[in-house]
Image: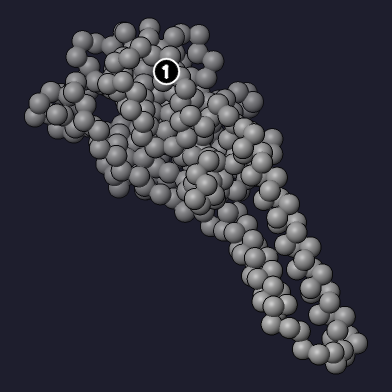
Amino acid sequence: MAGSQVTVVIFLVLFAAAVYIAAGLLLLRWLVGRFRQNAAAKPSRPFRAVRAAVFALAALGILCLLYARFVEPNWLAVERVRIVAPRLPAGARPVRLVLISDLHVEATPRLEEKLPDVIARERPDLILYAGDSLNAAEGLPRFRRCMTRLSAIAPVFAVRGNWDGWLHVPRLEGTGVRELKGEGARLEVRGTTLWIAGIPVGSPVAPDRVLAAAPPGALRIMLCHWPEDAEAAPPGAFDLCCAGHTHGGQITLPFYGMPLAMSEADRKYQRGLYRLGPGWLYVNRGIGMEGGRGIPRVRFGSRPEVTVIDLVPQ
């Protein structure tokens, strides 16, 4: 975390501790008074106001924790983006792609069963998956079932994320998903040629080499896990780069903006659409949650996301 993030986290922890200690003492005072049947004078108005504020803050904190744990992680958002792609011929029909990332499937089901139905309703021409599949080995069958259902909707292309190496079992084999390992794939969509350049985490092949192999005039889409990999491509090498990894911050406070659960490097491209030279970068907030390393498995201010991107001609 950056210094400012650490400062905010420390302040929030100390503030929450002070609120709950104060609430506990006030509750104890009330219980002792009830036990002794204290007939002392009625507390002053300022005291009653402070007591009400402390109890309200304590209740609000509990509600926020419950929301972040049980509500927002299951509250899927469909974000829609329209991008003008100069390489699309004039008069060509738009190309619709769906971007998802960071499923982080757990032992307990969450959105994996719902996801294919949501995506099918969008009628995409292709689906891109930006990696990070599992938090628990028990979730592997559910992850594979989800990806199999997605591949029945439209061609699915995937890259490896930084969490995809810990479980040495087949993740995508037999699901119909094509995993790109530092290579490109050609796809024809109603007469428009697409080139999907897949750059997984740890790819030995530079993005410029994969993008340079695109057929002449093809619409170039770069798929990677880390958003910063988009900067490794020369300006103008891609029309659109799709990435994940950041979870949109995963924990983002209202009015503060800066995420509390991301590293310093991740903050440059946090979520949404960015202009990179003549091309575009879109960072998806992901579906699941990362945990450990000081990051609780909660979401706050960063709902799980399915991104629907329409590429249209000028």
x and y percent of residue 164 in the render? 57, 26
Residue 96 sits in quarter: top left
Q: How many marks?
A: 1
- Residue at coordinates 62% horizontally, 39% vertically from top-left? 5
- Residue at coordinates 69% horizontally, 82% vertically from top-left? 45
Disc 1 marks which residue?
A: 231
Rendered view: 171 above or below 59: above
x and y percent of residue 298 in the render? 60, 48
- Residue at coordinates 81% horizontally, 80% vertically from top-left? 30
Residue 129 sits in quarter: top left
Q: Name the quadrant of the C terminus.
A: top left
Q: Name the quadrant of the N terminus.
A: top right
Residue 248 vs residue 77, the one in the foreground: 248
Which element type, helix, strand or loop, lies under badge 1?
Answer: helix
Rendered view: 301 above or below 271: below
Q: Amino acid at mark 1?
A: Glu
Q: Residues within 10 Å of mark 1 (few under 14, many from 20)?
A: few
Q: Is residue 7 visible?
A: yes
